[in-house]
Image (spheres, rainbow, N blue to C red):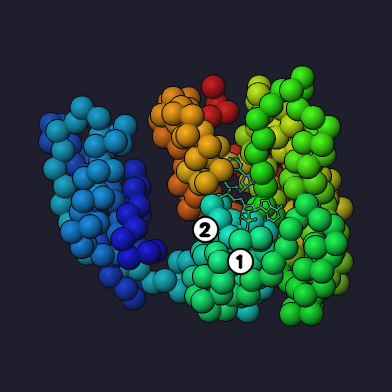
Amino acid sequence: MELDELYWFPEYKPRTETQENIYIMTMVNREPQQIIGHFVSRDKTSRTIQKLVATAVRLPELAGKRTVWYNKIRHQNKGADEMNFQGKTAVVTGGTSGIGESAARKLLEQGARVLVLGRNEEKGRALEALGNCRFLPCDVSDPQSIENACGQILADCPAPHILVNSAGMSLDGTVETLTLEQWNRIFAVNVTSVFLMCKHLIPAMRKNGYGRIVNIASTAGTVGAPGLESYAATKGAVIQLSRSMAASCAKDGVLINTVCPGGTLTPMMYSIEANGSLKEFASLFPLGRLAQPEEIANAIVFLASDEASFMVGSTVLVDGGFTCI
Ligand SMILES: NC(=O)c1ccc[n+]([C@@H]2O[C@H](COP(=O)([O-])OP(=O)(O)OC[C@H]3O[C@@H](n4cnc5c(N)ncnc54)[C@H](OP(=O)(O)O)[C@@H]3O)[C@@H](O)[C@H]2O)c1
């Protein structure tokens, strides 16, 4: 957890082993008196409290309720409860921003060595400064650039354990308005890059008898997305590519799955904000809000872990209920 991060758990099961302090702020309804949920944080600075208040007023679970909250200090044994990536090397495309960056940071926090691919050198170098991380400049729309980066990856680590393909772009347009050039461009960035990264790295994983690949698609790959037609087509392609690769690689210990985020507050989403319709978009989600990138990264990190040992070719929707309705 970052120092000022605050997590909301409708149900929170405290861990018993002791190692480090965490604060649990339990929200209780006054009449009838019942626990509504818990905020959990690693610290209790005034900034966290401010954030708690700001978050609480927006939480649908607390709407219209007269609440009180009380504090507990509990402990958690980090080693026993968190996924452990010590000794693992993870490659993350699109690790310089948004969802990929959040996944890269979580993997680093949990002990992995992380090789981040992207074009934004400044962001890449900032991640390198965290330690145990290497930035490899790569334009995933360029097959040669991918080949060069994969050569560097395999020279650095002959058998990378984890590959997260998060690099991607969005593009507005209908079939009538899109040009062929735009169509080819988005397929190069969103689909061909996944194909090429897998093509270059799967042989080493197979040989090692171990691999975890997490491809990032989108809800737009599972339901129609009018006005985002090329984007939806690329994400549908990623899902089917992942499922087919998963079936052919599973016996060699290379487990491949897809995460489909719903609307997530990253720079990709800010283009919608510029149009002033972010609030309207958020209202389409049963949860009534968009995701933080960390909430998507949690699913990615799980699928990248040893714990996901029976997950093969799954399409994991992390969408706040968007596709339920
Ligand atoms: N945000 C959402 O609501 C949402 C919803 C569903 C699915 N997704 C998917 O989640 C993934 C991550 O998106 P995000 O929301 O985290 O967006 P983001 O913050 O804009 O990040 C996009 C990432 O892709 C990389 N990238 C884009 N084009 C590239 C290229 N030609 N070569 C190398 N890297 C490239 C960028 O790296 P550089 O800047 O370094 O080039 C950046 O790290 C994407 O596949 C996206 O389609 C996002």
Element at label 2: helix
Of the 4 image quadrants, the one containing the C terminus is top right
Give the residue drawn at x 53%, y 29%: 322
Q: Nearer the viewer, mark 1 or mark 2?
A: 1
| Residue 308 percent location from the top left of the image | 63, 57
Taking 139 as reference, is 97 left or right?
A: left
- Dots 1 and 2: beta carbons under 8 Å? no
Confirm if mark 2 falls within 8 A of ligand 1.
yes
| Residue 212 percent location from the top left of the image | 71, 61
Of 187 and 212, which appears nearest the observer?
187
Q: Residue type at mark 1?
A: Glu
Give the residue drawn at x 64%, y 71%: 135
Q: Which residue is label 2 attached to?
A: 102
Residue 223 visible to an observer of this rendering:
no
How many circles with numbers are drawn on the protein?
Answer: 2
Give the residue drawn at x 50%, y 50%: 293
Q: Which residue is label 1 attached to?
A: 121
